[in-house]
C-alpha cells in the first residue's frame, strides 16, 4: 500500500521569499502524485499532478513540483510567495486502477510580512 | 452552480440525533467519494461510489450510511454518532477509471461539511 510523509507540520516564509514544501512517498510502482491546497473553511483544490513524462510539472498559482524517483520525493516549490498563499498544503499519492488517493498529514504555510 | 457543492456547511448534533450530509456535483463525473478530515490526521477515505455502485467501504462504522441515488448526488446519513466523529467531511467526484490499468483520475473536492457531535 502507498503512503505519504510530509515532514514539516508548519513552515513560515516571508512574503517574496522562495518556498519548498517536502513530500516523500512510498509505493512499489510508478506513482501518481498530487499537490492540493486547502484554504481555511474550504475544500481541497488541485495545484498540480504528476502522472508520467517530464519530472518537473507546472501548476496553478505559480507553483511547480519535481518528481525524483531516486529520492521518492515530490517537493513543491514557488519562487516568490504571496500572502494569499497562506494555507495548508497536502501531498497525495494515487494507485493505478481505481482512484484511491492517500494523503499526507499536510503542511501549514504561514506568510509573514 | 458549478463544481461540487456540499450542504450543510456546518452541523451540530447530539449523539442520539439523525442527520444527513448532502453532496451534489455538476461536473458530469461518474464517481463520488466521502473523506473524513480530522485535526492532525491524514484525510481518511470512507466510501467510494462508481456508476452509483459502492466500490469501497474502508471499515467505516455502521453509524455512517452512504447513499448514491444517481451519479450527481451523494448522501451521508448519520445516526447515534460519537464525539470523536466530529470532523470535516469532504465530498469529491471524478471520472471513474476505465479498467485496472488505467491512470489515476483527478478528484474535485467540495468545501466540506463541518460536523460537531455533542
Image (spheres, coloured by chain):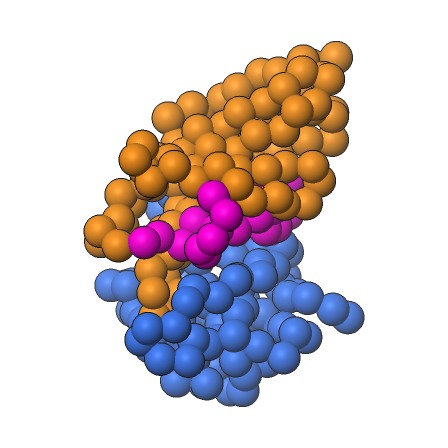
Chain colours: A orange, B blue
Q: Is residue B94 above or below residue B99?
A: above
Q: Quadrant of the N terminus of chain B?
A: bottom right
Residue A42 can be seen in this image = yes
Q: Position of residue A9 (x, y in %)?
A: 44, 25
Q: Is residue A42 magenta?
A: yes
* Magenta stretch encompasses residue A74: no
> Where, by quadrant of the figure, is residue A4 drawn?
top left
> Which stretch is magenta?
A30-55
User: Relative to A63, does residue A44 appear above or below in the rendering?
Assistant: below
Furthest toward the right, the residue is B1
Q: Is residue B118 left or right of B41 when viewed as pictured?
A: right
Task: Give residue B5's quadrant in the image.
Answer: bottom right
Outermost residue toward the front? A54
Q: Which residue is at 52% across, 33% downward?
A: A76
Task: Please tell me which residue lies in front, A102 or B12.
Answer: A102
Residue A17 image point, x, y percent: 67, 16
Percent x, y of residue A102: 36, 51
User: Percent position (x, y) of residue A98?
Assistant: 36, 70
B41 above or below A29? Answer: above
Which residue shows up at 61% across the image and 50% down it?
Answer: A45
Q: How many marks?
A: 0
Amino acid at each position: 500500500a502507498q503512503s505519504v510523509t510530509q515532514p514539516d507540520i508548519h513552515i513560515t516564509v516571508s512574503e517574496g521569499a522562495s518556498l519548498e514544501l517536502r513530500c516523500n512517498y512510498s509505493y512499489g510502482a510508478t506513482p501518481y502524485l498530487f499537490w492540493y491546497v486547502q484554504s481555511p473553511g474550504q475544500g481541497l483544490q488541485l495545484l498540480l499532478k504528476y502522472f508520467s513524462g517530464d519530472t518537473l510539472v507546472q501548476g496553478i498559482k505559480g507553483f511547480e513540483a519535481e518528481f525524483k524517483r531516486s529520492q521518492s520525493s515530490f517537493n513543491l516549490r514557488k519562487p516568490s510567495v504571496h500572502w494569499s498563499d497562506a494555507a495548508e498544503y497536502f501531498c497525495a499519492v494515487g494507485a493505478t486502477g481505481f482512484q484511491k488517493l492517500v494523503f499526507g498529514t499536510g503542511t501549514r504555510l504561514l506568510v509573514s510580512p | 452552480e458549478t463544481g461540487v457543492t456540499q450542504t450543510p456547511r456546518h452541523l451540530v448534533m447530539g449523539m442520539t440525533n439523525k442527520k444527513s450530509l448532502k453532496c451534489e456535483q455538476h461536473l458530469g463525473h461518474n464517481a463520488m467519494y466521502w473523506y473524513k478530515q480530522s485535526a492532525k490526521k491524514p484525510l481518511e477515505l470512507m466510501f467510494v461510489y462508481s456508476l452509483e455502485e459502492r466500490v469501497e467501504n474502508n471499515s467505516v462504522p455502521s453509524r455512517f450510511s452512504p447513499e448514491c441515488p444517481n451519479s450527481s448526488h451523494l448522501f451521508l446519513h448519520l445516526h447515534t454518532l460519537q464525539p470523536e466523529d466530529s470532523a470535516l467531511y469532504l465530498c469529491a467526484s471524478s471520472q471513474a477509471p476505465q479498467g485496472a490499468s488505467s491512470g489515476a483520475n483527478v478528484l474535485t473536492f467540495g468545501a466540506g461539511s463541518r460536523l460537531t457531535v455533542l
